[in-house]
Amino acid sequence: MRGVTHAKWAVCAMAAGLAATACGGGDSGAGGADGIVSSSWGDPQNPLEPSNTNEVQGGKVLDMLFRGLKRYDSKTGEAKDMLAEKIDTTDSVNFTVTVKDGWTFSNGEKVTAKSFVDAWNYGANLKNNQKNAYFFGYIDGYAQVHPDKGTPTAKTLSGLKVVNDKTFTVKLSQKFSTWPDTLGYAAFSPLPQAFFDNHDAWLSKPIGNGPYTVESYAKGSKLAMRRWDGYPGSDKAQNGGVDLNVYTDNNTAYTDLTAGNLDLVDDVPASQLKNVQADLGGRYINTPAGIIQTLAFPYYDEAWNTPDAVKVRQGLSRAINRRQITDTIFQKTRTPAKDWTSPVLGVDGGFSDTLCGDACEYNAAEAKKMITEGGGIPGGQVKISYNADSGSHKEWIDAVCNSINNALGNDTACVGNPVGTFADFRNQIGQHKMPGPFRAGWQMDYPLIQNFLQPLYYTNASSNDGLWTNAEFDKLVDEANAETDSKKAVETFQKAEEVVRDQMAAIPLWYQNGSAGYSDRVTNVALNPFSVPVYNEIKVK
Amino acid sequence: MGRYVIRRLLQMIPVFFGATLLIFLMVNVMGDPIAGLCGDRQCDPATAAQLRKEFGLDKPVWQQYLTYMGSVFTGDFGTAFNGQQVTELMGEAFPVTIRLTVVAIVFEMLIGITLGVITGLKRGRPVDTGVLLLTLVVISVPTFVTGLILQLLLGVEWGIIKPAVSPEAPVNELIVPGLVLASVSLAYVTRLTRTSIAENARSDYVRTAKAKGLPRRRVIGRHLLRNSLIPVVTFIGTDIGALMGGAIVTERIFNIHGVGYQLYQGILRQNTQTVVGFVTVLVIVFLVANLLVDLLYAVLDPRIRYA
């Protein structure tokens, strides 16, 4: 050891340094119909299984890999038949589903009625820990395979029966006329036998029946999808494939896009919205998505659950200058809310830009009056809780509080209450420990007005985090679900929504847009109502 | 020296257990991680309970810790929430971060020590003042500023590098991120070396060596530098661990899927298994690096001996 001198290791180090040379340059590869689109991606939180994926990153993969009975139109959001030849019902409880012929999985296996029934039974079974299990909650026998407590007493849903290769029947536990329209959600995708035979192998390289197949999947870094030439559907991929690259930060993805190394970024970071016009020109998309941001209230707290508190909530709603906040903080990537649904539903689907009316219009004087009439803010101060780890929640919560404080002429009337992580935030909400209103984002599962109301405001519904309860609302929702005429159903849902308005169960803030940017190498880029790029329609120059 | 090494290794055991226990408790204090798994909605209670059971989160913390440590010694670091083995995550992340750290350390040693020697020998001259000012600037500018500016200039404006490192993270793509990561430490190494050299340049043994008529290169290389490097080696040694764990900012900016990124994800998702697993390995790296530094003292200065 004595002989080792500094000179020696310095030389070694130098060699290592010299061996490395910087390099740069754009992507090479085929263009045209075989061109590969490179797109930014975030690491999916859960394993990629149809009934276990509940966030947008995993969802976009399933959207490329699977086709279900229904599919939502990429422009209008309307549920259209995909693998379903027909779905019949006479009583809104018993449905007969006929599956189209000629569909296969990419491994050659036929898609049959059994592919659906097996997949749904797997998704519903408590033993499989599927996070989307509640989607099967309307099917008869759900309580046996997925009890609230204890172990399942059945392995399969009693409401599902395979009649023959092409047909299966579904019995629901309650009337639900628009149930077929929910079937476009990824959780209802069919699964091949290969999924059940070798689950681990399937997870490392999923096999579906969509326009793409998985070429390679390096978890946490890159998923390479290629066009499946044997795809029988009408929405064939217009490109050779899509490479989803995981980025540690959406700012880096955006930088890579501007440097010409990436074709598509489907989440333009808020900090770059100022530059996006200069950087991308017309290659920037900013379209409405089925996402609404609201402020929910803790109705388990006596102070917020008094008859007078309605006035306070309405007053708070009127004290928020939505237009100013969406324009300045969000650079118009949000639209001030006029109801509790989303513009992507369309007027026929139940969206109304007059439903909230005055209650969502900014009026400082009126706001102050209403809050005083309602007995003032419970506890003298509103504390709005949010998770500080992601998004730009702090900025807009502070702005909302500013707006309220200005309206009331009191600097401490409203303060933000940051919670460190999203998990802890959800944790506190779940334990009903919120000290005041809290941010509640809702991203639709399927473009139905039902999905914007029932899960959020129905008594004890899955996402009714504030424990709001109203008999009139519940009754109207039940009626709407039982209504076989979809137009009448939508009208009844809107009546229910009026109850939400009159009680100001939650304050609607704004509708969120999807924002994306793309390179000049690709064309025909669009976002669907779920703010996911329509990958199969992207064309490479 | 053998006995010294053994004693040091034995001392590592309580440090190791203490550190892991602390991390384990800290992550646990943050609350129930399952709550965040279902997105902006409540997990249904039955599934949540089932998941809690699967990850062992339904047991008391001390029992979780014991089970965890038990399986760690059999090489099982548990499962991350996305279904991947933590060992698998480590296998992907550590090689990348080690490459990044090596690049950074090489920069620190090459540039830092060279500049340190030059300025130390030319105290008060314009070169010295210039470098001192420069290091002051580097130290005072936060890493993410340096990183983002270099990324914008080299990656977007001039197109010399790719702004984002590819998942395989080859060494050539890690040069700029390595330089950014090394920048602050590099400035410290320069300053440490400078002071040390300047101090020792006036010492008796250097005067003797000069008086013997030894060539200047030999005086500086063999006599002056060797003695002056002790504080520098200490710094670089402890810096290895700091660089590996502290690369979060650099890794985020340059899209490097290394230890920093995995730790960040793990903390965000409150994934105890990932966080504790990675920190455990980092603790070991830190301890071993420190031991090596202490052993290097004897090589640099034979007067330092270990019983």
Image (cartoon, coloured by chain):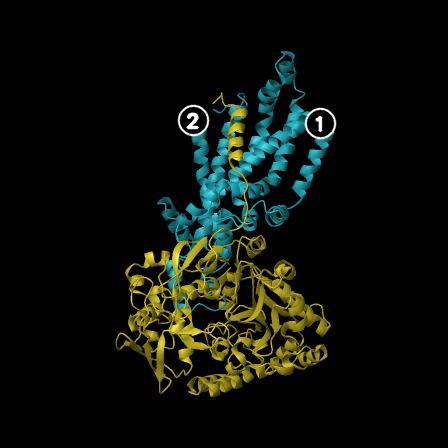
- Residue B123's tag is 1
Q: Name the residue under label 2.
A: B2
Chain of residue at mark 2: B
Q: In this view, does A171 lie to the left or right of B212?
A: left
Colour of the chain lettered B: cyan
Query: Considering the numbered disc 2 on the image, is that residue within a helix, a strand or a loop?
Result: helix
Mark closer to the chain start, 2 or 1: 2
Amino acid type for the residue under numbered disc 2:
Gly
Residue A387 drawn above or below residue A140: above
B284, A193: nearer the viewer: A193
Q: Is residue A173 left or right of residue A405?
A: left
Looking at the rendering, which quadrant does residue A298 occupy? Answer: bottom right
Q: Which residue in the rendered view is the most extreme toward the left?
A: A164
A136, B162: nearer the viewer: B162
Place of residue A505 in the rendered image (x, y in percent of width and height, measured from the top left): 56, 78
Callout in the foreground (2, 1): 1
Q: Which residue is drawn at 49% across and 28% down?
A: B295
Amino acid type for the residue under numbered disc 1:
Arg
Q: Which residue in the rendered view is the most extreme toward the top?
A: B212
Place of residue A374 in the rendered image (x, y in percent of width and height, measured from the top left): 65, 81
Q: Residue at x 40, y 53 (%)?
A: B64
Residue A492 drawn above or below residue B30: below
Residue A299 in sight here: no
Chain of residue at mark 1: B
Residue A308 in sight here: yes
A333, B207: nearer the viewer: A333
Colour of the chain lettered A: yellow
| Cα distance between the residues tagged 2 and 1 | 41 Å
- Residue A165's tag is none
Place of residue A43 in the rendered image (x, y in percent of width and height, measured from the top left): 47, 57
